[in-house]
């Protein structure tokens, strides 16, 4: 909440409201709240309490969360109780404590009515799912993404109206609504754009807004983002270590992700394919994504890194198949995301890999114990961003092994065979896999998994590397915000 008061000032508002006859009892408050909602053009998320003082305290919380709501309540009460001294006292207190919003009453009501119309034609709230992306565009990097629950676009609009203008003088709300018009249905988009045009004219921002749109048009004229990511994060449950709290989000390039799933119920691993199938076949944001390419990323704790997530099966129109032959599937380390001390090395190595993807050095380890752990760490610290291992991690052990040393060193790409491999054979196979542009390694790994099922009988044997390869491909430019320490505004 941007408009906030200390406890004493909030008590003053509560007491002033309770002194008004029609607001001192719940039935009267319900009547005036209904009138206030009609005046604002949208519902208010207000939950009643049995005690009058607690009920009014909750009402004041809501009034402070929605710009113009406190002033609108005073106007309604003045019309209803003409000449009332207690209403006049509330009016003076609101003027003292609650800043005047920059939008006028009629302009705000019209905007909320447009939002209501937009939500009617989009009952699935896919516009709300785009909130993180549009919010970040509107407020810029200085404001962190907020964790306040957004139940409707009315909540988003109320929040943004209270944020100060950016460097170019354009209020974030105006930027947000202007961007929202791009995604609105044809029946509502023109009216939303007209509302933005009028507000920009009133604020003297026509030229700034036109320039911003021109930049956006140029950006859209360039090729569409090359990749979309469906990210599934599994966090061990504190009470049941064999169950996981699962969060899923969709991300386009490096734009902020849109949350698709965030469950408080801890799930066993056996339920993950069911969630994947729902997201990949029924979620409108995934199915209706802007680009056909999709990479599936699993953010996993150390104990799950060796789990064959690419073998998870989904069913489409009665046909069941592994996701690893349909999409590039990679693994990311949850522990490393939480370990801020290694993020500098991780980012440095990722940048080096991105800039030298055609000729990046690779550290190949074909036998467990081939290097002392400090020796391996030193070797990886010198330059290699890619670590290839012919053997799996130690199962069920918290002791450091070669795989863990690779993660702590910051190596963004680690590949290994889950069942162990003949050293000479693994060296030959992995050399072929890593022979060209390493930034395309997830897609080549998908092709290798397909080859395991489509090659000739000899090559398609059960021990084909494509059936047993885990690929950690950890993009340090896309660390989810909960795992990034907040930086001061630029």
Image (cartoon, rainbow, N blue to C red):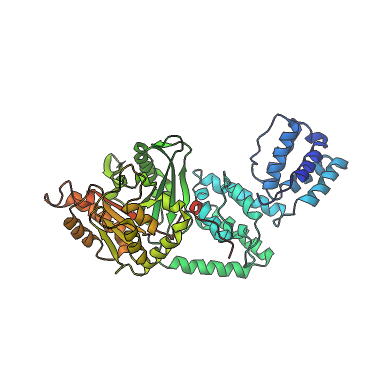
Q: Quadrant of the C terminus?
A: bottom right
Q: How many marks?
A: 0
Q: Would you say residue 186 is visible in this rendering?
A: no
Which image quadrant for residue 275?
A: top left
Residue drawn at x 32%, y 45% is 309
Give the x, y percent position of residue 191: 59, 56
Give the x, y percent position of residue 362: 29, 63
Relative to residue 60, is residue 364 depicted above or below?
Answer: below
Give the x, y percent position of residue 485: 53, 56
Q: Would you say residue 279 is visible in this rendering?
A: yes
In depth, the one of 478 and 77 nearer the eye is 478
Going by the image, does 41 lie left or right of 240? right
In depth, the one of 459 and 83 nearer the eye is 459
* The residue positioned farthest toward the left in the image shown: 458
Going by the image, does 167 lie left or right of 431? right
Give the x, y percent position of residue 155: 61, 47
Which image quadrant for residue 63?
A: top right
Going by the image, does 150 lie left or right of 251? right
Relative to residue 264, is residue 285 depicted above or below?
Answer: below
Residue drawn at x 20%, y 56% is 426
């Amino acid at each position: 909440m941007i408009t906030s008061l200390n406890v004493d000032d909030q008590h003053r508002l509560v007491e002033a409201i309770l002194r008004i006859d029609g607001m001192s009892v719940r039935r009267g408050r319900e009547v005036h709240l209904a009138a206030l909602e009609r005046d604002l053009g949208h519902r208010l998320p207000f939950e009643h309490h049995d005690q009058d003082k607690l009920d009014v305290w909750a009402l004041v919380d809501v009034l402070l969360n929605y710009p113009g709501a406190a002033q609108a309540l005073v106007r309604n009460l003045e019309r209803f109780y003409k000449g009332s001294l207690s209403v006049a006292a509330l009016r003076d207190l609101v003027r003292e404590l609650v800043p005047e919003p920059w939008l006028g009453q009629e302009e705000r009501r019209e905007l909320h009515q447009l939002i209501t119309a937009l939500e009617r034609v989009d009952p699935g709230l896919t516009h709300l799912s785009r909130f993180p992306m549009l919010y970040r565009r509107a407020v810029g990097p200085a404001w962190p993404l907020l964790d306040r629950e957004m139940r409707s676009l009315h909540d988003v609009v109320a929040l943004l109206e209270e944020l100060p203008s950016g460097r170019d003088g354009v209020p974030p709300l105006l930027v947000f609504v202007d961007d929202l018009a791009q995604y609105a249905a044809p029946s509502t988009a023109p009216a939303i754009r007209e509302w933005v045009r009028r507000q920009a004219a009133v604020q003297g921002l026509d030229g700034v807004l036109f320039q911003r749109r021109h930049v956006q048009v140029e950006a859209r004229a360039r090729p569409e983002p090359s990749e979309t990511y469906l990210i599934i994060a599994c966090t061990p449950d504190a009470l049941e270590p064999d169950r996981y709290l699962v969060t899923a989000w969709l991300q386009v390039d490096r734009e902020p992700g849109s949350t698709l799933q965030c469950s408080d119920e801890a799930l066993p691993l056996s339920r993950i394919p069911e969630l994947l199938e729902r997201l990949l076949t029924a979620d409108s944001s995934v199915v209706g994504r802007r680009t056909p390419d999709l990479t599936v990323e699993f953010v996993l704790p150390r104990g799950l890194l060796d789990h064959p997530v690419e073998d998870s099966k989904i069913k489409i129109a009665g046909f069941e198949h592994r996701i690893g032959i349909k999409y590039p599937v990679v693994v990311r380390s949850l522990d490393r995301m939480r370990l801020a001390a290694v993020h500098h090395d991780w980012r440095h190595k990722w940048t080096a890999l991105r800039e030298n993807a055609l000729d990046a050095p690779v550290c190949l380890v074909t036998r467990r114990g081939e290097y002392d752990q400090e020796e391996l760490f030193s070797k990886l610290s010198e330059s290699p961003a890619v670590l290839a291992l012919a053997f799996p991690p130690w199962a069920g052990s918290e002791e450091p092994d070669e795989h863990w040393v690779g993660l702590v060193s910051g190596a963004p790409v680690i590949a290994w065979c889950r069942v162990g491999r003949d050293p000479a054979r693994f060296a030959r196979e992995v050399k072929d896999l890593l022979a060209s542009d390493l930034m395309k390694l997830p897609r080549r790994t998908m092709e290798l998994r397909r080859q395991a099922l489509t090659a000739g009988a000899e090559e398609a044997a059960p021990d084909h590397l494509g059936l047993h390869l885990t690929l950690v491909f950890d993009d340090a430019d896309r660390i989810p915000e909960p795992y990034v320490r907040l930086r001061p505004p630029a």
